[in-house]
Image (tube, rainbow, N blue to C red):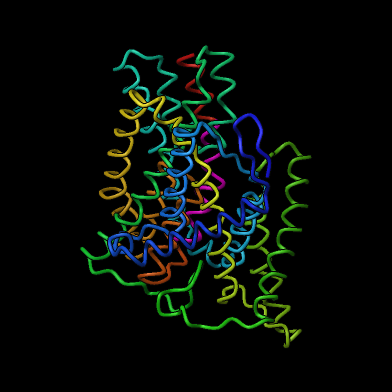
Amino acid sequence: MEFTNNTLALQSFITITLAIIVLFVGKGLNFRFAFLRNFNIPEPVVGGLLFSILFAIIYVVFGITVEFDMKGRDIMLVYFFTTIGLNSNVRDLVKGGKPLIILLTATILYMVIQNAVGISVASLFGLNPLVGMLGGTVSLIGGHGTAIAWAPTFAEQYGIDNAMEMGIACATFGLILASLMGGPIASFLIKKHDLQSTESGGQDVGLSDEQQDTQVDYFSFLHAILGIHVSILIGLLLNESLEEAGLKLPLFVTCLFAGILLSSFAIPKIRKKVFWLNWDSRGMAMALIADISLGIFLAMSLMSMQLWVIVDLAGPILAILTAQFVIAASITLFVIFKIMGSSYDAAVICSGFGGISLGSTATAMANMTAVTKRYGASHLAFVIVPLVCAFFIDLVNVFLIQTLLRFFG
C-alpha cells in the first residue's frame, strides 16, 4: 500500500481481499433487501457499486484517488471462462448450432443499430458523429478494453481530445445499466410466461438456492482445479500458436475452447481408464469455482470504477446512454426472447443479452448466473452466449469501427 500525490495505490493482494469483502457486503445487502433478490441483481454488482460510490465520496471530499492493481482480475477472468469451457462439450455446440447462428445474427444487427443510435443522438447535440461511436459499440458492447484500445486513435487521428474519458465514462455507466437490466427482464419473462428449466443437471456457475447446503469434498475440488489448470496450459499454447499465425485473441477465449476440447474428448476417456479419478467437469466444485472467479472479477471491475469521470462528462453522454438503454431493453424483451424460442432458455439468454448489449461478457454471465441460481440451469445459454460475446462479437466490432471511421472520419 502506497500513498503519493493524493493517490492511494493498493497492491494485488489487498485488491483481491477487498473484492472478497465487497462480495460479502453485496450478499448481505441482497439478504437484507428483498427487491434486490427479486430482480436478480448479482451480489458483486450490489457491493461493487456501493464501494465505487464510497471511493467517489473519498475523492470528492478529500481529493484522494484510490487505485487498484488489477492483475488478479485478469486471472479470475481466465479461470471463469475456462470453467465455462469445461462445462461444455462438442455435443452442446452441435445442439446450440441454430440458436447460436440466430443469436449471433441478431447481435450483429443490434451492433449496427447501437452505432446508429449513438451517432444520431450525438448529431442532435451538434457533436462530431464520432462522439456517438464512443457511445456505441466502442464502449458498450466493446467494454472498457475496446474503449481504451481505440481512444488514442479517436484522439490523435480524428481530433476527439477527450476520447479516453468519454469512452471510459460510457463503458462504466453502461456496465451499471447492463447489470441492472438483464436480471429483471428475465425474471419478468419467466413469471409472465410461467417458464421452467428443463435441465436435469446442476448449475453451470454456482449452486442453486436448493443446493447451498451441499458439501464439496477435498478431491472433487482438486479434480476441478486440475482440469482448469490443464485447460489453461493448453489455452496458452493455442493462444501463442494463433498469435504466431497472425491471429491475436484474448487468452480467455482460447482457454474456453481448450476447456471444450478437454471435456469433449479427454476427460471421458480418462474417467473410463482411471476409475478412481472422479473428474466431473459439471460437478458442484467446478460450479463453485466458476462462481467465485466471476464474483471476484466483477467485484474488482465495479469497485474500481471512477464515477466522478461520468459526472464530469454528463450531458450528451447521458442522453446517448438513455437512448441506448431504451433500445437495448426493447430489443431484448420484444425481439431476442421471441427469436430464441420464447422458452426458459430464451429468457436466460435475454438476461445475458441484456448484459452484453450495454456492458461486457462478464456482466452477461453474472446476469445469467443470478437467474439460473434462482430458477434452474440453462446449459444452452451458457454455451452460446459466451461464444457470441467473447469471440465473434470482438471480430465483428473491429470491422464495424474501422468501417464507420472511414465513413465519418
State which quadrant residue 17 falls in.
bottom right
Q: Where does the magenta region start and end?
A: 381-398
- Quadrant the N terminus occupies: top right
Above or below, comparing residue 324 to residue 337 in the picture: above
Report the number of numbered marks.
Answer: 0
Above or below, comparing residue 12 to residue 218 in the picture: above
> What residue is drawn where x is 68% and y is 65%?
228
**Residue 103 % position (x, y):** 42, 50
**Residue 220 % position (x, y):** 65, 80
395 falls in the magenta region:
yes
328 relative to 387 in the view: left or right: left
Is residue 242 in view?
A: yes
Which residue occupies the extreme bottom position in the image?
Answer: 275
> What residue is drawn where x is 31% and y is 48%?
332
Above or below, comparing residue 311 to residue 103 in the picture: above
Which residue occupies the extreme front position in the image?
Answer: 62
State which quadrant residue 83 falls in.
bottom right
Above or below, comparing residue 406 to residue 307 in the picture: above
328 falls in the magenta region:
no
> What residue is drawn where x is 55% and y is 32%?
398
Q: Nearer the viewer, residue 67 or 102?
A: 67
**Residue 199 % position (x, y):** 42, 75
> What residue is drawn where x is 63% and y is 29%?
5
**Residue 243 % position (x, y):** 74, 40
356 relative to 122 in the view: left or right: right
